[in-house]
Image (spheres, grey):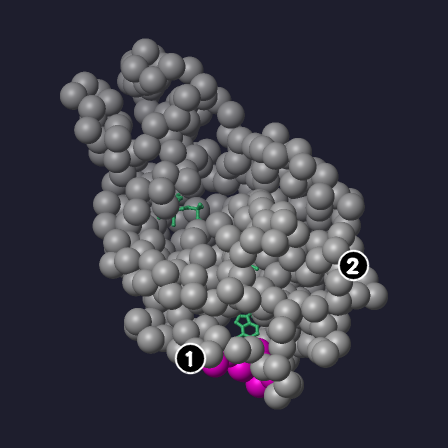
Amino acid sequence: MSMFDYVVVGAGLSGVVMAERIASQLKKRVLIIERREHVGGNTYDYYNEDGILVSRYGPHIFHTKLKEIWEYLSQFTEWHHYQHKVLGHVDGNLVPIPFNLNSIKILFPKPVAEKLSSKLIDFFGYGNKVHVLELKETKDEDLKFLADFVYDKVFLNFTHKQWGLRPEELDISITGRVPIYISYDDRYFKDEFQGVPKFGYARMIKNMLNHNNIKLMLNTDYREVLTVNHLTKQIKLFGQPFEGKLIYTGKIDELFDFCFGELPYRGLELKFETVNREFYQEAGTIHFPNEYEFTRVSEMKRITGQKSGVTTIIREFPKDCNRNDIPYYPIPQQENIEKFNQYKEKAKNYPNIILTGRLADYKYYDMHASILMALDKFKNLSKGSNL
Ligand code: FAD
Ligand code: UDP
């Protein structure tokens, strides 16, 4: 008999939600194994040497339409009720991103701006949104002009820097995350519930893991302590047969020894700088689609609401991602999705392995989606299903 009923690989949000539910609701014992030196996966944050709370892998703003997800996390943290605002540097101006009616007002002479705005409202309706690639297909000359403008000045070069690809070479859902809004609402996310944990994600996650039924092993690749026999499907933990369930939130291709080839990721390099003044820029994040090698600059204090005489900024430089680098973004292109589906099919033959999370599902989940998926998997698990 193992000391544990469940093993969770990965202490990112997905793994932590699973471990927390299993420990608190099923009252079962969980071992959570994490390769990095810290919990939280890509949400991890810490106070830097200047005393500023910074996100190691890039700023994270929590947002969801679902009250139950918000309430679930609220058991473990208080919130700083921040609503994210982003400005984009376009033709020497700083305009709201997602591009909206205010952006039009700033960038075009009044009569042009009024004509474009009223056409957008007539065609799509006030308060609605439209994908830049869809707007490009319109027959109306003025809207076509606007679409080409936004495509060229906001999407083309940013997407090229971020992905090394043109917008139409990526799954439409990626650029669709930032549609054109036919409104004056300058918020980056429109969800009802938004904010950042008052004392950071790492603190919130430590609270989630603070349960007698949960044991955490940091600095450990799961393969150091656990093996999966791909013929018999038997799992061994510390060399002993393990009859419980394995919840796996690492890369799906790694679990199967890359047998169908590697699933690619896009990487990032973050450069931190502390500036000796109270604030650095006018918004939480500023996008630079057309200048510099970095895509954006975020100012942590603008997001966290922390007070200090100095301020830390983060510049994001996209880059290729090798097998041992931190996997930031799955790349949802057809051939990768097909490869992923082969792994997913294979995984169905493993009755004791449950997959969830951004890496195991190879999906561009935001935090709320990672949590929702994990809570769903947990519900199925408590009903005795692996799906
Ligand atoms: P991860 O955070 O990747 O966690 C997986 C964990 O598994 C990692 O800790 C990893 O070390 C561990 N692991 C992997 N392999 C092994 C192994 N072999 N052995 C042991 N451990 C292993 N979402 C939002 O909602 N708002 C945002 O503003 C936002 N900003 C983002 C910015 C960036 C730059 C990125 C990359 C993502 C952002 N996200 C944002 C998405 C968010 O990070 C994810 O939804 C969430 O972190 C996914 O959690 P996860 O547990 O599935 O994956
Ligand atoms: N995008 C862009 N210009 C922008 C903002 C976004 O071209 O000013 C595109 C780009 O391809 C990016 C995608 O839209 O990767 C999704 O943007 P989002 O801000 O959601 O990216 P994330 O925060 O997930 O990195």
Q: From the viewer's perspective, is 50 left or right of 314?
A: right
Q: From the viewer's perspective, is 355 left or right of 180?
A: right
Up-down relation of residue 172 to residue 145 (above or below): below
As helix, strand or loop, the secondary structure at mark 2 comes to loop
Disc 1 or 2, which lies upstream in sequence? 2
Q: From the viewer's perspective, is 293 left or right of 353?
A: left
As helix, strand or loop, the secondary structure at mark 1 comes to loop
Q: Residue sitting at 16 percent across and 21 percent down?
A: 139
Q: Residue sitting at 44 percent across and 25 percent down?
A: 102
Q: Quadrant of residue 192?
A: top right
Say what amino acid the circle numbered 2 marks.
Lys
Say what amino acid the circle numbered 1 marks.
Leu
Up-down relation of residue 274 to residue 301 (above or below): below
- Residue nearest the viewer, comparing 127 with 382: 382
- Please identify the residue farthest to the bottom as the structure is shown: 239
- Work out whether residue 148 can be spotted: yes
Residue 27 is labelled as 2
Q: Residue sitting at 38 percent across and 14 percent down?
A: 125
Comparing labels 1 and 2, the label whose residue is closer to the camera: 1
- Residue nearest the viewer, comparing 109 with 353: 353
Residue 170 spot, x, y in % from top left: 28, 50
Q: Is residue 196 magenta?
A: no
Rendered-image quadrant of the N terminus: bottom right
Q: Quadrant of residue 119?
A: top left
- Residue nearest the viewer, comparing 174 with 101: 174
Residue 80 spot, x, y in % from top left: 72, 42
Residue 62 is labelled as none
| Residue corresponding to mark 1 | 231
Residue 127 spot, x, y in % from top left: 45, 19
**Mark-to-mark CA distance, 1 and 2:** 32 Å
Give the residues drawn in magenta, as a range. Answer: 222-229
Q: Residues within 10 Å of mark 2 (few under 14, many from 20)?
A: some
